[in-house]
Image (spheres, rainbow, N blue to C red):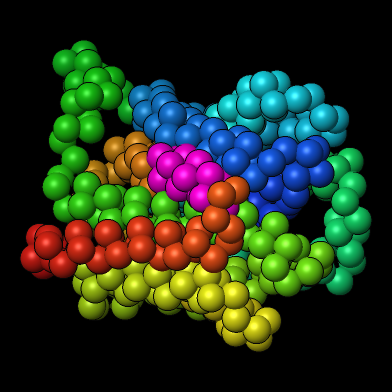
Amino acid sequence: MVLRFSINYFIFFAAMATVVPYLQQILKLQGFRAYEIGLLLGVFEITGIFGPLLIGWFADRVGKYRLILLVLTLGSGASFLFFIVNIGFAATFLILILFGMMFRPIASLTDALASRTITNAVDQYGRARIWGSIGFVGISFFYQIWGFLDTGSTVRIVTVFIVLMSALFLSNISLPEIYRDKRNHSDLKKRESLKNVIRSMPFPFWVGISAAFFIKMSMSGYYSFFSIYLNDVYNINGISGIWGIGALAEIPVVLWGSKYVVRYGISKMLGLAALGTAVRMIIYALELPVPLMLAAQLLHALSFGLLHITIIVLINQQIKEKSRALAMAIFGGISYGLAGFLGSTLSGFILDSHGFSIMYYFCGIISLGAIFLIVRFRRIFI
């Protein structure tokens, strides 16, 4: 079972390594300004609110996770085809909504399926999820060496993505299926109330999700503009390998991090993730020499790896098994979607008017909000 999910994570995050660095490049090649790119990528991020939330709730309600994943994979590939041509701001806006609603729920739904089907998920999850990081790193360095996607060709980027989504579709077929449990009518009615399920989630879960929101909002300037930052500030066109350094750093944390989260506690690990993110953004703001900028990429181990594995542990500790798909969707929606939308939009306007340095200082300050929240409510995780 772990092997099946390992292959799935490997392919999906290889696709992610194509979308994250190169979608912003596609938009720049199509002539959009920084504030327009910020708005467009913000829209893509906000689909991470509604897509994972609705899909996660629907999956918990009807089961058939695998079938839903197959539909999402097909829809993601089909919608990404539209980026081959320049269709203008309004049409691109709509396509990004469609693409985001299909692509963004895949990760959280896969996480939820893994948590429900892998034996001893808290310990075994990391062994499967680590292959996602390996996939991101491997494909990133492959792109760096190959140089095929650094030529400014939108068609090449789209083609590679379609190939990867086709492979993901085949991988999804091998995953286990979950069917809706038989239960009495009153239980079914309660299960189908999204409002009731959300209200039943405990307070420590919401504090953790809120802290993750600030950390991910802080990271939005990285996810939306880092490739352009490398082009404009350092005159670097071969961006894939630099993105790969960050993903490489997260691997040991994802693999072994859960035991340290359990040992030292949720609040300490969230605080460490927030502090690492703030330091990282400030280093980018200072526009230091290339070796120091590359060293900052190693902090991805904290700002992504540690944050993600801590939230996984939090959900497994606080949320009932039958509601974990929805909990993962809430994490994705609030901490990636809403945070990404607000952060990307604000970062785009700041970049357009004040440049990269001020934008990254702004991002670093945002992460301090998570530290304040964690210190204020640290005792609830004990």
Q: Between 261 and 370, which is closer to the camera in this rendering?
A: 370
Q: Does residue 186 appear in this view? A: yes
Quadrant containing the N terminus in the rendered view = bottom right
Question: 340 left or right of 44?
Answer: left
Going by the picture, which residue comes out furthest to the top? 185
Instruction: State the residue at coordinates (17%, 53%).
Output: 204
Left/right of residue 66 with respect to residue 254 in the rendered view: right
- The residue nearer to you, when weighing 228 against 73, is 228
Q: Check residue 105 for magenta coloring.
A: no
> Secondary structure of the magenta portion, mostly?
helix
The image quadrant where one finds the C terminus is bottom left
Residue 193 position by quadrant: top left
Residue 39 coordinates in the image, percent (x, y): 56, 36
Q: Would residue 138 be found to the left or right of residue 1 on screen?
A: right
Magenta residue check for 338: yes
Place residue 208 in its image quadrant: bottom left
Q: Residue 232, how many percent across, how many down?
A: 73, 62
Stretch in magenta = 336-351
Relative to 292, say whether 325 is above or below.
above
Q: How many marks?
A: 0
In the rendered view, does 206 fall on the left or right side of 136? left
Farthest front residue in view:
353
Is residue 123 shown to the viewer in this render?
Answer: no
For the point 85% across and 43% down, which residue is it? 154
- Percent x, y of residue 296: 54, 78
**Picture coordinates of residue 143 (x, y %)?**
82, 63
Is 298 located above or below residue 273 in the figure? below
The quarter of the displayed image where residue 183 is located: top left
Q: Residue at x 86, y 56 (%)?
A: 149
